[in-house]
Image (spheres, grey):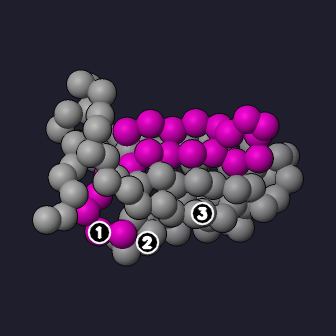
Amino acid sequence: MFVLELTYTASLDRVDAALARHVDWLREHYEAGTFLASGRKVPRDGGVIIAVGGDRAAVEELTRTDPFAREGLASYRVTEFLATTTAPALDAHRQQPPA
């Protein structure tokens, strides 16, 4: 599982101008089952996405397809973790540590 942390690198006016394209991108990846949760950080200097995927390189490549990243409006920090404990709603995403 991955935590994708976005940090805005442009003014909120520019971010807001691209927001609809970013939301469409989010929706696409929710429908594909890759994203589990997302939202703005408080204070509003970026956002956070919880994502699933088996390959870190593929997830990092995915972040580069975000309109915010493509248009130079945000940078991403990708943190991979093993979700060994989850809420019941996320049981399908529970992971086992390597032996």
Residue 54 shown left or right of residue 44 in the figure: left
Within 10 Å of the Cα at label 3, are there few (<14), some (14-19), or many (20+) other Cα atoms?
many
Q: Amino acid at mark 3?
A: Tyr
Nearest-to-viewer mark from 3 and 2: 3
Secondary structure type for disc 1: loop
* Quadrant housing residue 90: top left
Q: Which residue, given by chain and number where applicable, does mark 2 sit on?
A: 61
Secondary structure type for disc 2: helix
Q: Residue furthest front?
A: 99
| Residue 55 - label | 1
Q: CA distance from mark 3 to mark 2?
A: 11 Å
Secondary structure type for disc 3: strand
Nearest-to-viewer mark from 1 and 2: 1
Q: CA distance from mark 1 to mark 2?
A: 10 Å
Q: Which residue, given by chain and number where applicable, does mark 3 sit on?
A: 76
46 up-or-down from 98: above or below: above
The location of residue 71, given as percent across then percent down, is: 68, 65
Work out whether residue 62 or residue 41 is closer to the camera in this orientation and state it: 41
Q: Residue furthest bottom?
A: 57
Within 10 Å of the Cα at label 1, are there few (<14), some (14-19), or many (20+) other Cα atoms?
few
